[in-house]
Structure formats: C-alpha cells, structure tokens
Image (cartoon, rainbow, N blue to C red):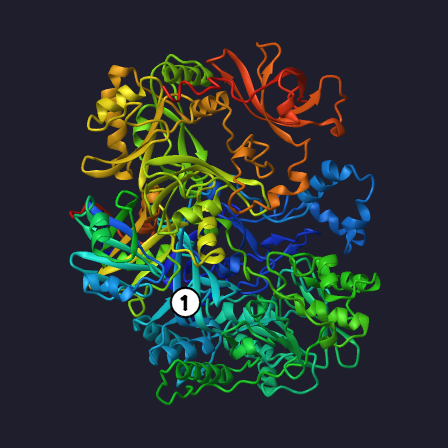
Amino acid sequence: MSRLNEGGLVDRSKPLGFTFDGRPYRGFEGDTLASALIANDVKLVGRSFKYHRPRGILTAGSEEPNALVTLRSGAWAEPNTRATTVSLYDGLEATSQNRWPSLALDVMAINQLAAPIFVAGFYYKTFMWPAKFWEKLYEPLIRRAAGLGRASMLPDPDHYDRNHAFCDLLVIGGGPAGLAAAQTAGRAGLRVIIADDDTMLGGRLLSERLEIDDMSAAAWAQGIAAELAEMPNVTVLTRTSVFGVYDGREYGAVERVQDHVARPSVGQPRQRLWKIIAKRALLAAGAIERPLVFGGNDRPGVMMASAVSTYLNRFGVIAGRRVVVFTATDSGWSTALDLIAAGVEVVAVVDSRSTRHVAADRVKAAGAEIFLEARVDDVQGRSARAVDIRTANGTIRTLAADLVAMSGGWNPSIGLGSNLGSRPVWHEPLQSFVLDRTPPGMAAIGAAAGRLSLAEALADGVSVAAAIATDAGRPSAMAVAPRCSDEATAVSPMWHVTTRQTKAFVDFQHDVTDDDIALAAREGFVSIEHLKRYTTMGMATDQGKTSQLNGHALLAAATGKTMAEAGTILSRPPYLPVAIGVFAGHHRDEHFRPVRRTASHAWAAEQGASFVDAGQWKRAQWFARPDETSWLDTVNREVTMTRNGVGICDVSTLGKIDVHGPDAGVLLDRLYINTFSTLPIGKARYGVMLREDGFVMDDGTATRFADDRFFLTTTTVNAAKVMQHIDYARQVLWPEFDVQATSVTEQWATFAVAGPQSRALLQTMLPDLDLSNEGFPFMAAAEFRWHGAAARIFRLSFSGELAFEVSVPANLGDLFIRTAFQIGAAFDLVAYGTEALGVMRVEKGHAAGNEISGQATAGDLGMGRMMSTKKDFIGRVMAQRPGLIAADRAVLVGLKPVDRAVRLRAGGHLLASDADAVAANDEGYVTSAAFSPTLGHSIALALLKRGASRHGETIRIHDPVRGGDIPVEVCHPVFLDPEGMRIRG
Amino acid sequence: MADTLQISECQNFGFATVMSRKNADVAAIGGALQVNMPAGPTCVAVQGAVLIGTGPGNWLAFAEGKALTLADELTLRLPGVSVSDQSGGYVIFRIAGPAARRLLQRGAFIDLDPSTFNVGSAATTVMAHIGVVIWQIDDAETFHVAVFRSLAGSLRDFMQSASQSMNAPFGTTAARG
C-alpha cells in the first residue's frame, strides 16, 4: 500500500471495496478510482490506442489521456471513463480496455515492432489498394486492432434529467479565482451559478500546501463553499462540467448526479443536462500542466508533477518511492518539496533552466541531487525503473527511480473561450496561448487568463466580480482579496528533448510521437489544422488537453516558425466527452417526440384499433375484428359497410382555422384560386390554395358562418403551414385588410359520418336539426348546441357517399363517439380508419397528399377550371408559366389493371406499351393505389403525360424494384359514381 | 424532504382567443371590462376571468366555470374584437406547491425566477417540445399551464418524469372550477 497514515481529504474511517479487472481492492471515501489504484500500487491501467503500449496514470484531472477504463458492466458499462475523475464508491467495478488477452500481456503490443510503418498518415498510405478491400477488410481490421472501450450495445437503463437556469454571473471553475469571484458576486446579491467538475469546490487549493487568510487553502475553500451554499442567490453545481458556449450567452453543462453510486436510485437521473443563460460568465477553469517530450515519457511511473502533489496532498497517496522531478517550471520544485515533506525520497531534481530555484538548498539538504540546464533523455523499464539524465556538460547520469514527476509549464484552460470561433493568440511573456476575443459576456480570470499565482487568481476573482456587480447596479462593499502564500510561477518552456534514444510521445491517447510531427512537417502538413488531422494529434477523447501545445511547438520548430506564427486550433463543444443520453433526456423510446391523440383515441384503443403516425398525430388506421386474418379484410369490410350502411371516422386531425373580420372574404379570395367572398352564410365550399410559384399548396373547405366569420379546413399535414401562410398574407402582404385568424384545430373533434344511412343515424342523434335534402342540402353548414356546447354540422363528403361532418368541442369528442355507437347499433354503424378513408377517396378520385406533391398544378389535378379569372390570388401569375400549362404535363388519371386479378402498387412509372424502359420514355407515375372492394379489383391514381386525352388507352406500369410490368387501362380518375348521385342523395 | 407538487386539471373552464380588429381601440376593449388589456406577456384578473397577453392585439381569456358561455359573452361585451372559442381545445394544468416553479423551469427555457416571473406574469413558450401558455395565479406558487388537448398526455408524461427526477411526488386530483 502506498497510502499515508494521515493527511489529505479522504475519510479513512469509510473504507470502500472495488474491483479492477476482477481483482478486489480497497480505497476510502473521497478517493478517485485513480487515487485508489495508486494507493494499491496498481501502475499499469491501460493500453495505448495504436501501439498498445502499457500506460499508467498521467494526471489527476479530467485532462487524463491514459487511464481510460470501462466503468460498471452489462447495460451500465461506460467505456472510456477517466479513472482520474471517477469518484470511488463501494462495489465499483472497472475494467481495462484495448488489450487482449489481458492488460499485462497484450498480444497487440506487437504493433510496436511494426512502429516504423504506423507513422502519421499510415492508413492513407497503406490501405490504398485495392480500394474494394477497404470496407470489407481493412476498416474492420483497423477498428478491431485500434480503439478504446466498447459500447455495451444494450439500451441505456438510466434516466437523464434536464434543467434550465438563468443568472447574472456564471463562474466556470471552483478554484481560487472562481471561489473569490462567486463570493464577491454572491455577497453583492447577484444571481450566481458556480460550476465545477470536481466533487467539491476548491480546485488546486485541495491539492497544494498553500495558505489563505492564515489557514490551509483547503480549509479556506471549504469555508467559502459553505458560505456560497447558504446564499439563496447562489447555485453551487459540483460534479458539473460546463462543456460548451453557444450563441446568446448560452452555456451547456452536464451534472453527474448519480455517477458516484453503483446504481442510481429508482426514478433518479444519472446525469442532468443544464442549459444556462448567463449575462456574464467568468472562465476560471485554471490551467493544465504540460508534459515534457522525452524518451519513454509515456511509461507507467511517469506522471505530471502536479498530479504527484495532488495524490499526495489530497488523497494521502504516494505514487512512487524514489522520485526524479524533471521540470521547466517553479511549480515542479513545489512538488519536490511536497514529497520531501511527506518523507518520500527525491533522488534528483532536473531543471532545464539555468537559474537556481530558491528551494534548491532545502531540496539538496533532503538528499536530492540538483541538475540545472539538464534534462531527462530517457526512462528505462516497462514501468519506470531508472532515468538517463543528460547533465549540463552533456554527460549521462543514470539514476534508479520508480517515479518521474514532470512539469513542462501550464496551459490555461481556454477551450471554452474559442467555442464561438475566436482563435487564441500567443502570449510571449506567459509562453502560452490566451484568449483574444472572448465570447460575449465572458472573461477569463486567474490561471485560465495566464495569471498563474494564487495571489493573482484571488485578486482577479475579487476585482472582476466586483466590477460585474457594479455594472449590474449592485456595487459591493470594498472587496479585498484575501492574503495568501507567495509562490513563484516562472517557466521557461522546454518543448523537446532531441537527444532522447527511445520513443517520445506528444499525444499519449492517440500515440502521436515527436517523429510523427516531424514527418508531417516534412510531408508538407505545415498548417496547424492539417497537422492535427494528418497525425490525429488532439483528436482523441481528451481533445489534446495535455498534448496540443507541445505538438504546436514541435511543428513550429520543424517549420522554422515562431509559436505565434504556427498558431493554435479552435476548440468545439463539448469540452469533455458527454453521454449522448443526457442530450436526449426524457425524449427517448415512446417519448422521443410529443404525441398528439385525437378525442376518440381512448375509445379507438378500446376497440382494438391499430394506429398510424400522421406527423405527431396518432390516427386509427383500421379496426380489426377478431375473425379477420389480414388488414385488407378489415379495410374491405369498413369500406363496404360504410358504402352500404353508415361508417364514422375521426377526422379531427385536419387543420382548422377561424378567419374573422370584415375583410375575411376578400382575404380568402386572395388565398384560394376560387372565389369565397360570395359564399352565402351557412354554406361550405371546396377550395385550392397555390404557392407563390403557382403549384398547389393545399386544399380544403371554407365555410361561412357570418358575414365576417369563416372557418377553414386544411389537410392534416399542412395545418401549420397554411396557418403561417394566412398570417403572412394578412400581416405582411395585405396589412390593410381588417382580418384576424387563429388556429382552432384543437377546439373541434370532427367526425365524418358517411354512407346511405348517415342521415338516419344523425337525425336520431340530433333530432332538433332538419337534415333532409331540402333543409340541409349538399355543402350546407349549421351551428347548433350539443350538450349545451357550441357544435357544428357540415354536409361534406370525402367518401363520395351521402355524408356529414360533425364537430363538437374536443373535450366532448369522446362522449360523441360513444353516443354515436350507442345509437348506431341500430344502424349497424361501423368505425373506419385512415386506410378505408384512403380507399374511398381513391375510388372517388380525390387528390390527396400523394398527388399534391408540390410538383402538381391545379390543372394537373383536374381543377384548372376552378382558377378564377376575375380576381387576383397568390400563385395566379406564376401558374401561367409556359412549363406549368404545357400540353404534355402529367395530369391526374385513373388506372385499372388489364388483368383485374393483378394488384397495383403506388410508385411504379408509366410507359407506353411498346416503349423501352428508359428514363427518356417515362410518362409519369402511380401516385396512389388501392384495392377497391366496391369494384372488386385494384385501382390506382396516377399522373400521366397528356392523360386527359388518353382515357381508354392501355399502357404499362414499370416497377423494376418489386418486379414486372403491369399492363393497365387509363381511365377517368373518378371510379365510382362520377355523376355524384350518392353525395346528393 | 421532498417538496410537494400538486398537479390537477382544471374542469369546466371557458377559454377563448381574443384578437383586436384593425384600428380597434384597445383602451375601449379593456374599458368594457374595466381593466387595462395586457400589452405584453402578462395577465390580468377581472370579474372571475383572466386575460393573458399572447401577442400584439392578441389575448387568451380564461374563466373558470364558463366552458359554455365565455366566448359568446366576450363577443357580446367587447367592442372591436374577433373571438374564437377554445374551451374544448386545451387542457389546463393547475400546478401548485413549493416544487411547482422548479418543475416548470425544467421544461421551459425562460427565466421563471420569482424576480422576473410572478403573479401577473404570463409566457407563451415551449416545454418538452410542446407549446404551452403559462401564467402564475397567486403568491402561493400556483401556476396554470395551458396545452393543446391532443398533446396533454405527452406533457403529463414529461411532468411525471421530471417530478420524479426532482424527487417531488406528483399528486393528481381533478380540481374544481
């Protein structure tokens, strides 16, 4: 065990059991999986992506590239989880990835022997020919050999929640700068949200031996956290990653609500998506320590110096017994001092710089050798065993060590700041990229702004937040930053150890080496964006948080550019990997999208109806009876019973619009191709609307209930579009009209009652109405009261039968359908669904969505003569374009199979009987087809070139997809009762 | 301790769209009810009814117990308006209790903090991809949420799931009036 007996923020009174690759271990409450593994002396935790090299834990944060494990198992398995960010819980189960047969013995490590061919761009160079092998052979092979964890492929058993928040100030990061800012703004009364990845606020204060206000920094942080938790105007979100910045000052964040337990409690979400609108935001995300690029820098036992300190100070865990610190920064010396204070043997401090650090004497007094202007060339051993140090005079010293703590400098965590497209700029004094133009409302503070010392971070947090409070009209009392430890933060970057003998890695997760970058440069990939894509550097799940800057520096060196000239890349959301499930939230499976149910839905479901989606609507498709063996039997029965008796169908999904006002009639004249201003009160009329471009947009009816009160219906699918079209016409095209319009689709449950017995049924149901042919002729409409509520009846027919449409308020729709069937038993009333509705409309040759496809004119659909020449209307001029009135346009016809036993299907194309089946001979296509139980054979509607003059001709339907050509006879599209005797009966 | 949440459905309410006619005198419309018509996303209670601003010259009128009469009454009383009855077209959820505001905030991406949304506030917005009209009716954290009747089931499903996530048990009773 490498756990100290005391110190750190773990609770030694709460031991937790967990397994890694099936072996049991123990850790404590407060551990991460990574700290618990280190405490148990587990050094090897994963295999690398390409070479399958053994890898250990590199960092102690979310930037971790190496220690990726699969957490949990079965449907709960979560691949590629960073061990450094997983809170340990009792029973935690983790498995290593990308190795076979085991982590210790991975046969794919043989890839290392072939390393010379696995260079940058090797896919493109190696798997070129034969091209057809790519899909079947190369890609599956590569995917098996490379890669990380595997998805479980099982449905996600967890719930994901969502929340929205609005604030004056969003503080991203709960380190010293963030805490100071949140406290200052919170005390000033601003609505503040502070979000931090970690399980508790504090950031580096939890990991370093610093003092603030004469107390330990960790204790200070806990004090501020407690104060913030008490403020009603402050929301503290721990375990929460802000992953993206979006337009309109919108921020995306994911809160890991129950990731730190084995199974979320019932009904509780595992994670929660937050959409946050923040007037102002402070990026206080700190900085990420940069690795050094030397031989074997990826070996288990090589760790970031800051991580070594974190494991020691926060978790009471020592990551090695004999440590060499390799540093280009002052902070590396702090790690050496931390180790010495904990009694760990520091063998040497290797500083690439020439200036002797102030702590050098203390370090030396503890027994460590000091090497200035020196470097680590190579690490020996599969796990670190010894290091080769190149001293200032060029000689090599080899020292035994099992841990190398490296510190190459600090990269401000500015990823979120470039989400909206502003490229970071090089800052020479800070030796790092910093934000140039931040997203609106956002500013970086503290280490994220390159101000690395604790004093700077605290001062930034206080002063910037105070200024924001003042801007918001809430000037705070004189805010002063707390006193804190002095610390040196000097750094002279050392980008590359060129004298190394063994492989030196830049991007650990994607196995990109210094050689790969040099090769990419030699091959001409000298733009930072090309380099990234060619080498895949920074494109792994860690998005290059540790690797990017080193890679850019190597490219700059290889191409003779300065860092400023080489530049850096932009960062897109998400900053950290986010489970797709959290974006879906509640909206999965049957809740994927909202569902609209008609008023008779519950009744129809009781009758055993099958439902079909019509946009968001669920419509009853047919009502099968137990003795029926196919849907066609059911539909044939529904049609036949309706045509011979009476049927009822819920048509509530049709769009319905009230158009009111003195100019309502005039507006309708402009919207429809035919005239409505002359429509008498109490009458309905069928109408067609065109788009501006002259093609048919929609059809429906309009009914006049008063001089200034019209009621329109639209097709189901175009309900919203027509509403929008009307609003556009009345608000934009003709604002001078006094006309109001509103959707009443939802107000009315509407039922089509069709068939020769429909009048008798309705007269029984509605005895106060006169529904006789004289009292209520075809296209009549009336308002009446039903159960005290306003109701309407129309004499309209889509089926071609004597038919009515009855509308009652939707809340009474269920009562209406049940009443109809109580009374309808005597009339052998049948319920019919959309399929029977469709059969009857094909029999009657009515155009519907299949025909009104956006490519048909009114003339094509046989309604050319409806187009008024006495008035203007939308689409009138464009409908007269030569192409739209050409003689050879495809127009609506009916088709009957020459062999009546043959079944027709929609979609087949039309050819003259003797024409070759080539596109040039195409004469149109079948738009709708149905079996007509009334006629006893298949029928179809089609759009056929010059179709109006070809009735009686035999042509063929060419249907290569479903096989065979079918000879058909062209006929009038109205198959049944063309004179309309039934409708007027 | 979970915050409680009471969700019920209003019964027998009248609901109607009121749109002012061109050049209508909005002051006169309000005058007929002795009230100032809302000129923004707000609502005003008057004579047992609530008028909710939904757009320029556009209002929704809500009145408990008036399912059969509200639209006709408004047509008779208000000068210069077009009225469309919507009493059957909406389900109106009455959402009350300390967790009510938090539940609505989970669904609606508008600021429902009491400092910006309180008694007299109204919003026409979207919850869980479903269009809703929300208004706060009293200081006791009671809200009305109007939703198209066809979509009420989906909104109820969402509220059930969200309240479970909030650990706020969801009691449903049919409210009177």
**Circle count:** 1
Q: Residue furthest front?
A: A870
Q: Badge 1: how crowded within 10 Å, few (<14), some, or many (20+)? A: some
Asked whether residue B141 appears in the rendered view, the answer is no
Give the position of the C terminus of chain A as an image quadrant: top left
Instruction: Determine whether A86 is above or below A886 in the image.
Output: below
Q: Position of residue A270 (x, y in %)?
A: 41, 51
Instruction: Classify mark 1: helix, strand or loop.
Output: loop
Q: Nearer the viewer, residue A114 or B109?
A: B109
Residue A95 horizontal side relative to residue A610, left or right: right
Residue A313 horizontal side relative to residue A824, left or right: right
Which residue occupies 68% across, 65% down?
A297
Which residue occupies 81% across, 44% down?
A128
Q: Identify the image quadrant of residue B122.
A: bottom left
Give the chain letter at badge 1: A
Residue for badge 1? A200
Instruction: Determine whether A544 is above or below A411 in the image.
Output: above
Q: Position of residue A832 (x, y in %)?
A: 38, 23
Q: Position of residue A747 (x, y in %)?
A: 31, 42
Residue A144 horizontal side relative to residue A978, left or right: right
Asked whether residue A526 appears in the rendered view, the answer is yes
Tell me the amino acid under the disc marked 1: Met
Q: Nearer the viewer, residue A215 or A419?
A: A419
Q: Position of residue A485 (x, y in %)?
A: 47, 85
Q: Nearer the viewer, residue A856 or A461?
A: A856
